[in-house]
Image: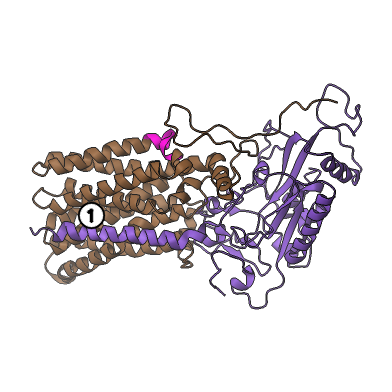
Chain colours: A purple, B brown
């Protein structure tokens, strides 16, 4: 039940929400070092959850024509083209490519794809499948005024679409810009971590569809161990830029239920470098509002009692 | 070996510029193709308008209760009727901005301390009932003296006073919870302003409530409304100045673009209104003009704050740079 860390700090969210016999907390570990940008996760998510299309746009910035997470995009693959920082990073990428049967055609160029061979590429694509973080301290859930957003027994955060009245408060509350309002529908939508599947012991659609195990689903504690091991391996192989994001229960949101292995700074992927749940400051906000409210009372008292008619 | 066409992605755009005073050195930062990190609020100007009408209702209810207790009937009537009109407008703005307006009653499913909107809904509901009762009581003199309506006419003044006092008790919360509501978001310019916005909104509410009194009541009774209007305007100006200048990079959205224009207009209108209120204590016309300026200033303040929040969410600079500075790596 609610305790001193209910708004901020390390905590196990399901018991804090009142579950007495909660199963282990479930989550995603998304290892971007092996993501090949195939977008199978985006498609599988849409298929399983019957998520409408998000417009057939050409954004003209990269292979990413989706842009970001939204009410109609619950998995989003980001593409970042940049100079390769190290040969070691390229080795890791090639290895991931070799696990699938398709051939990487390289960047658009004046020569035939693959004509220069695969060994002399000096740029890389960072690819990352983004998703709702299912925060330990979820601001969207904290601020929802209808109780539509709730914490599941698995520690995830889900919208009940039959209750949401589209007030829109969750949308600016999310420090990651995940949840959004569906325009023709009026309600807020986001990843449910396939609540309907995991309750049946199944794997979420995106993780099921991922061909390189970039998206791994499981018990969060185990995923965190696995991720730490993976970072160690990458560091040993010389990929010093590998780092985890959202894995730390001591971070500003109490750790993410869906965390990542990144190969560059978080903001390069469109992630906030140091997100903090806004409700951490809620007690202080009310205190300031209380002082302002008292100043109104004092002003009114002086205005009316200071003079008699 | 071919060179890549592009340098490593630097999504950073330089800050400042456009002739605005540069208070903060230009920030170099990285981003995902310059796209926003957080989502901008989906709320329309209806919500900014509600911040104004809600503040007006709260300020008017305070004025009405004070006038009731100090026997200023014309000021009381003005305050109560203004509060009622502002509540009706507020209800409209709040419901129409929902994605599913037919489900507005779902707001009353829960009372949730972690949600300022939930707390605000309950404050608004209680305040509306009480202020509505007070306004209805103003009909007492127009009811027949006999029969059931006569009974109501005799009971209404007491009920109206009770309602008016209850509304006044809730008014300070009504005026300031909206500041907590927008501060309790990841919208950079709003969250950073949480120690200041309640004072902006409190001052703005007092100024508009006093202004309504200046417009609606004769100068003989409007003295306290004048005091409140000037005090509120002073608080609004001082607190807004802090928001515009004391928050480093996150003050920038309040000084630039549409928000900057609105807040500059608000400053002129509010200052002119306060001066007019001070100088026009003998003239109903000058008082009413001053009241009009104060109301317009209050509305412009709310719209300006609203726009600043939106602008800060739409540019990744305002999300990334302060967080990088917090991490000590910029």
Residue sitting at x 34%, y 52%: B199
Between B100 and A110, the one nearer to me in the picture: A110
Q: On the picture, is B306 further left or further right than A264? A: left
- The x, y position of residue B218, in whole percent, is 11, 48
Estimate the x, y position of residue B68 in percent, counting from the top left. Answer: 16, 62
Is B139 included in the stretch rendered in magenta? no
Judged by its main secondary structure, the magenta piece is helix
Q: Across the whole image, how many numbered discs are drawn on residues?
A: 1
Outermost residue to the bottom? A20
Name the image quarter holding residue A284: bottom left
Seen from the viewer's position, the closer of residues A120 and B228 is A120
> Furthest-top residue in view?
A110
Name the residue rendered at 68%, 36% in the picture: A56
Quadrant of the image occupied by residue A61: top right
| Chain letter, disc 1 residue | B
- Residue under the image location 68 percent in, 30 percent down: A60
Is residue B38 shown to the viewer in this render? yes
Q: Which residue is mark 1?
A: B81
> For the magenta stretch, what is the residue range?
B253-261
Q: Position of residue A240 (x, y in %)?
A: 77, 47
> Within the image, what quadrant is residue B126 found in?
bottom left
> Which image quarter holds the C terminus of chain B?
top right
**Disc 1 crowd, CA 10 A, few/some/many (<14, 14-19, 20+):** many
Using the image as rendered, state which of residue B87 and residue B226 is in the foreground: B226
Q: Quadrant of the N terminus of chain B?
A: top right
Pinpoint residue B7: horizontal percent, then vertical percent.
Answer: 71, 29
Kind of element beneath mark 1:
helix
Q: Is residue B31 above or below residue B89?
A: above
Whether residue B118 appears in this view of the structure is: no
């Amino acid at each position: 039940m609610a305790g001193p860390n209910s708004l901020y700090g390390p905590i196990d969210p399901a018991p804090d929400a009142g579950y007495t016999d909660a199963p282990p907390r479930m989550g995603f570990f998304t290892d971007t070092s092996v993501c090949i940008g195939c977008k199978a996760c985006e498609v599988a998510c849409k298929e399983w959850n019957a998520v409408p299309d998000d417009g057939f746009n050409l954004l003209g910035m990269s292979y990413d024509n989706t842009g970001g997470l939204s009410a109609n995009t619950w998995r989003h693959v980001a593409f970042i083209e940049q100079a390769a920082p190290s040969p070691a990073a390229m080795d890791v990428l090639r290895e991931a490519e070799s696990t699938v049967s398709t051939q990487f055609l390289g960047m658009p160029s004046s020569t035939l794809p693959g004509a220069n061979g695969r060994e002399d590429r000096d740029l890389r694509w960072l690819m990352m499948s983004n998703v709702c973080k299912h925060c330990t301290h979820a601001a969207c859930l904290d601020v929802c005024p209808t109780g539509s957003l709730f914490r599941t027994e698995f520690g995830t955060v889900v919208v009940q679409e039959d209750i949401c009245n589209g007030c829109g408060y969750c949308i600016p509350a999310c420090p990651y810009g995940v949840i959004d309002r569906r325009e023709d529908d009026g309600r807020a939508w986001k990843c449910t971590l396939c609540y309907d599947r995991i309750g049946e012991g199944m794997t979420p659609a995106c993780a099921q569809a991922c061909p390189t195990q970039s998206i791994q689903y499981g018990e969060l504690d185990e995923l965190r161990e696995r991720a730490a091991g993976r970072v160690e391996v990458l560091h040993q192989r010389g990929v010093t830029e590998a780092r985890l994001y959202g894995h730390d229960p001591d971070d500003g949101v109490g750790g993410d239920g869906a965390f990542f292995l990144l190969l560059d700074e978080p903001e390069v992927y469109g992630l906030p470098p140091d997100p903090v749940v806004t409700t951490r400051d809620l007690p202080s906000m009310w205190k300031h509002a209380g002082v302002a409210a008292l100043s109104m009372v004092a002003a009114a008292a002086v205005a009316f009692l200071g003079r008699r008619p | 070996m071919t060179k890549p066409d592009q340098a490593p992605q630097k999504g950073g755009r330089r800050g400042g510029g456009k002739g605005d005073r540069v208070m903060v050195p230009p920030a170099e930062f990285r981003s995902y193709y310059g796209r926003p990190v957080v989502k901008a609020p989906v709320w329309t100007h209806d919500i900014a308008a509600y911040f104004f009408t809600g503040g007006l209702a709260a300020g008017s209810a305070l004025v009405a209760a004070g006038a009731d207790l100090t026997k200023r009937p014309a000021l009381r009537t003005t305050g109560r009727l203004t509060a009622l009109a502002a509540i009706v407008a507020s209800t409209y703005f709040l419901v129409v901005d929902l994605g599913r307006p037919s489900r507005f009653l779902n707001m009353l499913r829960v009372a949730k301390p972690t949600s300022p909107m939930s707390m605000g809904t309950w404050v608004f509901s209680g305040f509306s009932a009480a202020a509505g009762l007070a306004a209805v009581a103003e009909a007492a003199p127009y009811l027949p003296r006999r029969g059931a309506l006569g009974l109501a006419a005799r009971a209404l003044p007491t009920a109206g006073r009770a309602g008016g006092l209850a509304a006044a008790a809730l008014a300070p919360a009504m005026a300031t919870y909206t500041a907590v509501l927008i501060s309790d978001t990841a919208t950079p310019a709003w969250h950073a302003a949480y120690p200041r916005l309640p004072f902006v909104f409190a001052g703005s509410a007092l100024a508009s409530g006093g202004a309504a009194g200046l417009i609606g009541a004769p100068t003989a009774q409007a003295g306290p409304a004048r005091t409140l209007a000037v005090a509120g305007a002073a608080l609004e100006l001082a607190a807004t100045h802090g928001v515009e200048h004391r928050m480093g990079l996150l003050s920038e959205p309040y000084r630039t673009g549409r928000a900057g224009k609105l807040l500059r207009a608000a400053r002129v209108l509010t200052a002119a209104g306060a001066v007019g209120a001070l100088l026009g204590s003998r003239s109903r016309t000058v008082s009413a003009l001053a009241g009009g300026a104060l109301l317009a200033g209050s509305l412009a303040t709310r719209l300006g704050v609203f726009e600043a929040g939106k602008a800060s969410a739409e540019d990744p600079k305002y999300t990334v740079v302060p967080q990088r500075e917090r991490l000590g790596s910029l």
